[in-house]
Structures are given as C-alpha cells and as structure tokens.
C-alpha cells in the first residue's frame, strides 16, 4: 500500500487540482474518494478546516491558502478569482471566525437512523461516521433533541438533558410508544473532537444564533413543503449511522447455529 499523504499535502493536491474554490467539507470528500489518506480520525472535515485556518492564522501572507468566504478556500498561487483578487484573511479575522465556530448551537446530527441497527440496553452504542472510512463516534451520551418515526411520520419529539440520548431512546423501547417507531433522528449540542470524544456544553448561547438554529432543526427534521430551502442555518455535521458490531456478531452466531442444527 502506498504511503498516505500528510493532511497538508493532501489538501494542497486537492485544491491545486481544482479549478474553483472549495468548501472544506468538499476538500475532505475528495481526499477520501481519491485515497490520499486512510487515517481519517472521527472528524475529517473539521481537520481539513483546522489545517487551513491555522495556516492562515499563523503564516499570514506566507500561507499557501486564501479564504474566499466562510469555509471556502483556494490556493494563493491561483491568482485572481472572479472579478477581483481573493481577500486574504488576517490572523485577527481567523481568531474571530474560530471563536464563532466554537459556539455553533447544534454540532452534529443524524437523520432517519434505523432502530434495528442498535443493540439496545441501558447504555447503547449509537455509532455514526462523518464519512465512510472515518472513525465511528458513539453518540450515546449526546444531549439535544430527538424525533421518533413510524415510517416517515413523526410520532414523538423529545429532549435529552439529565438523561443522555442513548438512555432516552432505550426507554422508548419499553414505554407506550415502543411498538410504534422504527427510525429516529437526533440533533446534538455537545461538540465532537478529532478523536471522537464528546466535549462540554458552552455556558451560554446567543439568541441571534439560537433562533436560526431552532428554525433550521425544524426545517431539516420536518421537511415542510412550503419551505423552499433546507435548514441552511444548521451548521452541524451530519453523521451517517454505523452498524453496532454486536448485532453483526449475533447475526453470524445465529446463522452458524442454524447451519449446525441442520447437520
């Protein structure tokens, strides 16, 4: 297997080959799809963003990157973009944006996860990945808002505060709605580190960010027909559900036992 590139070299390769500026999440997607890195961590998109913004912050005009708009970058040596020279981000601007990013309301979410892909107990593993190949993150201890579905219909909306997401969902496998839901969505407030650990909740939230975030959650979760856009103010990262390995082990064991019983 060829040696994988460093994050910086992989970013340079992707941006250098692109004819247009790219959002950091798109850069991460291309790094993964082109096989430039195999060790992705739990938050590859956030890692790409950190690599670029730290370079701009600490290297200034010597940084190979230029910020075009929020989250969108290009290589400095590409010259003019659009009708003028790309705006260079100063260290002061980077620090401000970095501070703002740390206080987004919803940090992560999962849509229409399957109930039967979780091994249910008092502390179930709710495994999700940013991208295929990334390190799975366990959201059992996440806090926030969740929805239960019967097919595509929302039958229950709940919150997790004193009892985390995994515990609340587990309780719904044995309460009055236990037989009515087969999927769930969730929107979490605790940040996710590069290693996949959940962080702490900020001490306060600004109303100017809280209100758009609540609207974005409702649009994303309920998909109302008259809304012409998705939850554009939902700055969180979506995680795709990952099978709990324990379920796969049980299925293999059941298949093996069934085969042995026929001998």
Image (cartoon, rainbow, N blue to C red):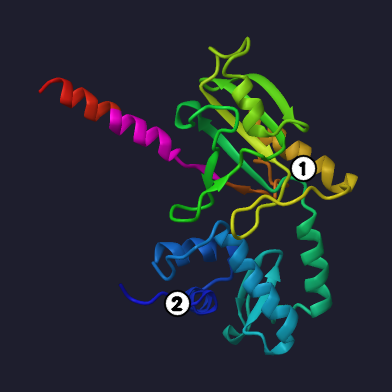
The numbered mark, 1 or 2, whose residue comes first in the sequence reads: 2
Residue at the extreme top:
176
Which image quarter holds the C terminus?
top left
Secondary structure state at the residue bearing disc 2: loop
Callout 1 touching callout 2 (CB < 8 Å)? no
Q: Residues within 10 Å of mark 2 (few under 14, many from 20)?
A: some
Quadrant of residue 262 within the rendered picture? top left
Q: Residue at x 58, y 61 (%)?
A: 45
| Residue in front for this viewpoint, 9 or 251 | 251
Disc nearest the viewer among 1 and 2: 2
Q: Horizontal and vertical percent for residue 111?
A: 57, 36
| Residue 213, disc | 1
Which image quarter holds the N terminus?
bottom left
Q: Does the image show residue 5?
A: yes
| Residue in front for this viewpoint, 71 or 132 | 132
Q: Horizontal and vertical percent for residue 142?
A: 68, 40
Q: Does the image show residue 224?
A: no
| Residue 104 part of the magenta-drawn span | no
- Residue designated by label 2: 5
Magenta segment range? 239-253
Q: Horizontal and vertical percent for residue 4?
A: 41, 74
Quadrant of residue 3 within the rendered picture? bottom left
Give the alpha-carbon distance from disc 1 to disc 2, as whole Å.
36 Å
């Amino acid at each position: 297997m060829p040696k994988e590139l460093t994050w910086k070299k992989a970013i340079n390769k992707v941006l250098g080959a692109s004819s247009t500026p790219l959002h950091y999440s798109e850069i991460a997607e291309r790094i993964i799809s082109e096989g430039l890195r195999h060790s992705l961590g739990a938050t590859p998109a956030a890692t790409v963003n950190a690599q670029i913004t730290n370079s701009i912050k600490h290297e200034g005009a010597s940084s190979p990157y230029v910020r075009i708009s929020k989250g969108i970058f290009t290589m400095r040596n590409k010259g003019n973009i659009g009708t003028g020279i790309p705006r260079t981000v100063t260290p002061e601007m980077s620090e401000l944006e970095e501070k703002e990013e740390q206080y987004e309301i919803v940090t992560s979410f999962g849509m229409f996860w399957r109930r039967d892909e979780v091994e249910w107990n008092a502390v179930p593993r709710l495994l999700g990945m940013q991208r295929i190949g990334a390190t799975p993150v366990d959201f059992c201890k996440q806090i926030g808002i969740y929805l239960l579905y019967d097919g595509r219909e929302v039958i229950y909306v709940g919150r997790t505060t004193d009892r985390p997401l995994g515990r609340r969902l587990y309780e719904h496998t044995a309460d009055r709605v236990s037989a009515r839901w087969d999927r769930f969505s969730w929107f979490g407030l605790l940040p996710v580190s590069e290693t996949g650990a959940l962080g702490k909740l900020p001490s306060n939230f600004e109303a100017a960010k809280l209100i758009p975030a609540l609207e974005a959650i409702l649009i994303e979760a309920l998909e109302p027909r008259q809304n012409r856009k998705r939850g554009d103010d939902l700055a969180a990262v979506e995680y795709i559900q990952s099978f709990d390995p324990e379920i796969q082990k049980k299925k293999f064991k059941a298949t093996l036992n069934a085969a042995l019983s026929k001998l």
